[in-house]
Image: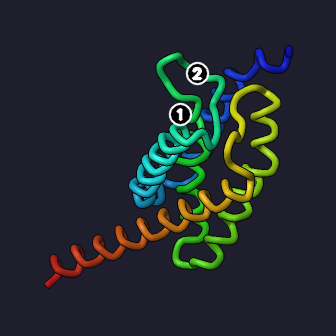
Amino acid sequence: MKIMKYSKSLMLLMMILPWITTPLLGKSSFKRYLPAGLFITLMVRIVNIIAKKRKWWWWYEPLHPKLSGVIPFMWGPFFVGSMWILKWTYGKFFRYMILNGIFDSIFTYIVVPYLTKFGIASLVRMKKIQLMYVFTVLSFLLYMFQELKENVQSNIVGSQEV
């Protein structure tokens, strides 16, 4: 299929395009949410290792033979997108979960079929609704990580002022 020959280019774009928006985050927001972005990237990697063993989904096309196909998504939309969502919604948990649900639904129900069409990835032993549950748990963990980080940081700053 001709469309599959563009899969590496598409993956590269999916990784690079979100980074073009990072200057718009602002330096202070980038610094504030960087640990959370790194945390979610690690969590996505762990979930992907589990998914590979359980054959939840399969990545057909890696950017490089030694790298998993999930790498462009971890370091692109998940990393940068998580920082954006936190910037827009942190401190408003319900709004955060709604916005995450919208983006996760777009990925699950619109992007995943295109990933399959382009021969990049597909769900194997997991239904789309189950993928949404995984994303919901990851979203919750991300918010709790940021909440914990903010509490620890404010306690450290508060104890230094005394």
Image quadrant where one finds the N terminus: top right
Residue 146 located left or right of residue 5? left
Are there few (<14), some (14-19), or many (20+) residues within 10 Å of tag 2?
some
Residue 123 located left or right of residue 154? right
Most foreground residue, 132 or 30: 132
Q: Secondary structure at mark 1?
A: helix
User: What x and y, as percent, mark residue 146?
Assistant: 43, 67
Q: How many marks?
A: 2
Q: Secondary structure at mark 2?
A: loop
Seen at 61% across and 33% down, the residue is 16
Are there few (<14), some (14-19), or many (20+) residues within 10 Å of tag 1?
some
When the figure is inspected, residue 127 is found, relative to residue 116, above or below; the finding is below
Q: Which dot marks residue 63?
A: 2
When the figure is inspected, residue 96 is found, relative to residue 7, above or below; the finding is below
Q: Earlier in the sequence, mark 1 or mark 2?
A: 2
User: What x and y, as percent, mark residue 49?
Assistant: 48, 40
Seen at 30% across and 76% down, the residue is 154
User: What x and y, as percent, mark residue 94?
Assistant: 63, 79
Seen at 53% across and 71% down, the residue is 90
When the figure is inspected, residue 121 is found, relative to residue 44, above or below; the finding is above
Q: Quadrant of residue 88?
A: bottom right
Three-letter amino acid code at disc 1? Ile
Kindly identify which residue carries mark 1. 71
When the figure is inspected, residue 150 is found, relative to residue 81, above or below; the finding is below
Seen at 75% across and 26% down, the residue is 119
Whether the residues at callouts 1 and 2 have beta carbons within 8 Å, the answer is yes
Three-letter amino acid code at disc 2? Leu
Residue 56 located left or right of residue 157? right
Residue 115 located left or right of residue 41? right
Here the colouring is rainbow
User: What x and y, as percent, mark residue 126?
Assistant: 68, 48
